[in-house]
Image (cartoon, grey):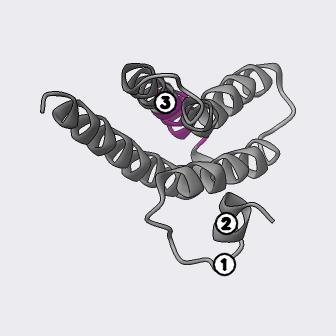
């Protein structure tokens, strides 16, 4: 079993590994989108939400094979942008589908925590670049 998979299955405790958190968040988003009503507007928003949320972790994983620190940082910046887009879609759903408001607020909080972890990583990587 890969290191990432073993970290994901350890427990329900929140990981301090941003890649693990992003992966777990992707799974939560997929399960959440499956709860949305079968109406055109929710299909469109749900599709965009899945794309942006899963892109967070996918870009971090893709960044692992970067050929330079600069390229690695760029992938993390793309992940942060995807997290911002995810916030937009979740906020839109929260304001238009109040039945799942509490669940959406939990997802927004998790997205915010992941965003902060990514932003902190970017700042650390950029500061190391200067020395």
- Chief SS of the magenta region: helix
The residue tagged 1 is 10
Report, in whole angstroms, how far the alpha carbon at label 1 lies from the one at label 2.
6 Å
Indicate the position of residue 75 as horizontal and vertical percent values: 48, 25
Indicate the position of residue 39 as horizontal and vertical percent values: 83, 27
The reply to whether the magenta stretch includes residue 96 is: yes
Q: Note whether 17 is above or below 129 in the view shown.
A: below
Residue nearest the observer in this picture, 18 or 69:
69
Structural crowding at the residue carrying mark 2, measured as other residues with C-alpha within 10 Å and reported as few (<14), some (14–19) or many (≥20): some
Q: Note whether 108 is above or below 15 in the view shown.
A: above
The residue tagged 3 is 79
Tag 2 and tag 3, C-beta contact below 8 Å = no
Q: Which region is colored magenta?
A: 86-97
> Measuring 55% from the left and 50% from the top, which residue is drawn there?
19
Residue nearest the observer in this picture, 78 or 93:
78
Report, in whole angstroms, how far the alpha carbon at label 1 lies from the one at label 3.
24 Å
Under circle 3, the secondary element is helix
| Residue found at the very far right of the displayed protein | 38
């Amino acid at each position: 079993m890969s290191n990432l998979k073993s970290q994901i299955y350890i427990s329900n405790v929140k990981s301090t590994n941003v890649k693990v958190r992003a992966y777990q968040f992707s799974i939560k988003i997929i399960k959440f989108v499956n709860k949305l009503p079968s109406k055109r507007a929710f299909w469109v928003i749900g599709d965009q939400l899945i794309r942006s949320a899963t892109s967070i972790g996918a870009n971090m994983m893709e960044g692992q094979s970067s050929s330079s620190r600069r390229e690695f940082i760029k992938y993390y910046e793309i992940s942060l942008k995807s997290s911002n887009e995810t916030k937009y879609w979740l906020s839109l759903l929260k304001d238009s589908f109040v039945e799942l408001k509490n669940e959406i607020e939990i997802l927004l909080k998790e997205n915010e925590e992941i965003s902060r972890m990514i932003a902190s990583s970017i700042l650390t990587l950029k500061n190391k670049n200067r020395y």
